[in-house]
Amino acid sequence: MSDDLPPDFDMEEFRRRQRDRSRIMAIAMGALAILFFLITIAKIGLLA
């Protein structure tokens, strides 16, 4: 598999970018979950 990589390929840089994308996705998914929770609480509060 490593034979398919271009000669100037930097695995450390690739892993760093991969970790950065993972963190961004985790933050976005967490924010979406919090948003859904707050919307649910607001709707329950309006009905009660």
Image (spheres, helix red, strand yellow):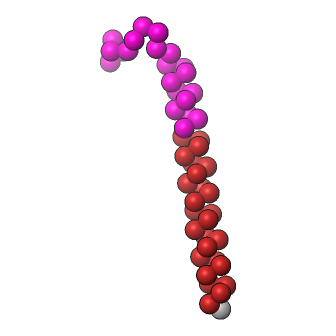
Question: Is 23 covered by the magenta stretch?
Answer: no
- Residue shown at 42% from the left, 7% from the top: 7
- Residue 3, image x and y in percent? 33, 11
**Placement of 23 over or under 37, stated as above or below:** above
Question: Is 16 covered by the magenta stretch?
Answer: yes
Give the residues in magenta: 1-21
**Placement of 15 over or under 6, stated as above or below:** below
Q: What secondary structure characterizes most of the magenta part?
A: helix
- Residue shown at 65% from the left, 87% from the top: 46
- Residue 10, image x and y in percent? 50, 15
- Residue shown at 55% from the left, 21% from the top: 13
Position of 45 with respect to 13 (left or right) is right
Image quadrant assignment for residue 45 = bottom right
- Residue shown at 58% from the left, 51% from the top: 28
* Residue closest to the far top: 7
Q: How many marks?
A: 0
